[in-house]
Amino acid sequence: MKTWPVATLLFLFGIPLHAQQSDLKNWYNDPFFALSQGFADCPVPLGPLMNHAQMESDAHYRVERGTTCWLAHKCSKPNSYLYDAPIADAIHGHFTDPHAFDGTSIWIMVQRRFVYVDGCAPRSFDRHALQQQLEAIPDVEQVFMRVGTDAHGPLPYKTLAAPDDPANGHPDEDTAPK
């Protein structure tokens, strides 16, 4: 039995390749924003974008993971995702120096009090200092640094360019809890 590449099947049925990405949305309004965009050709992270099927698959786990913090008496809010927008606002407020990230392309995503730092930076960029500053923001539980040094090599995060390609960064499950 012959198997056909997805791109071939899409072409045969008249569906443009980019149509797969058109249904990607930030279904849960997770904060996702750029701190900088100064590293040439750094691919944009996939961030919180997912298709409808992924959203439906993730819904139960988000409810479960979100309430665990409150049930364990580690959060005052009934769902840990309720902290995300204030954490994102605090990050925006903390990093106001327009030159602090010169030469980097850094995106921030906040989910369930976790801060994900994706992007590209030169080897000389002090990743540890950024991580410490983010960890000091109130209510941040953990920071995951996924910053590469080569925009054309393997990156430690999934990119918007090819979200379903297994060679495209590391799946979130491998780099951090969801």
Image: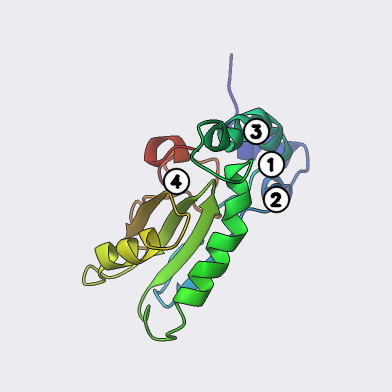
Compare residues 2 and 52 and report the one nearer the observer: 52
Disc 4 versus disc 2: distance between alpha carbons?
19 Å
Return the mark for residue 145.
Answer: none
Compare residues 147 and 11 and report the one nearer the observer: 147
Residue at 61%, 46% in the rendered image: 77
Q: Are marks 2 and 1 in contact (CB under 8 Å)?
A: yes
| Amino acid type assigned to the residue bearing label 4 in the image | Asn
Quick one: label 2 or label 1, which is nearer the N terminus?
Answer: 2
| Amino acid type assigned to the residue bearing label 2 in the image | Lys
Q: Which residue is mark 1?
A: 51
Q: Which residue is mark 2?
A: 25
Disc 2 versus disc 1: distance between alpha carbons?
6 Å
| Amino acid type assigned to the residue bearing label 1 in the image | Asn
Vertical relation: 83 (above or below) 10: below
Q: Which residue is mark 4?
A: 168
Q: Which residue is mark 3?
A: 63
> SS at mark 4?
loop
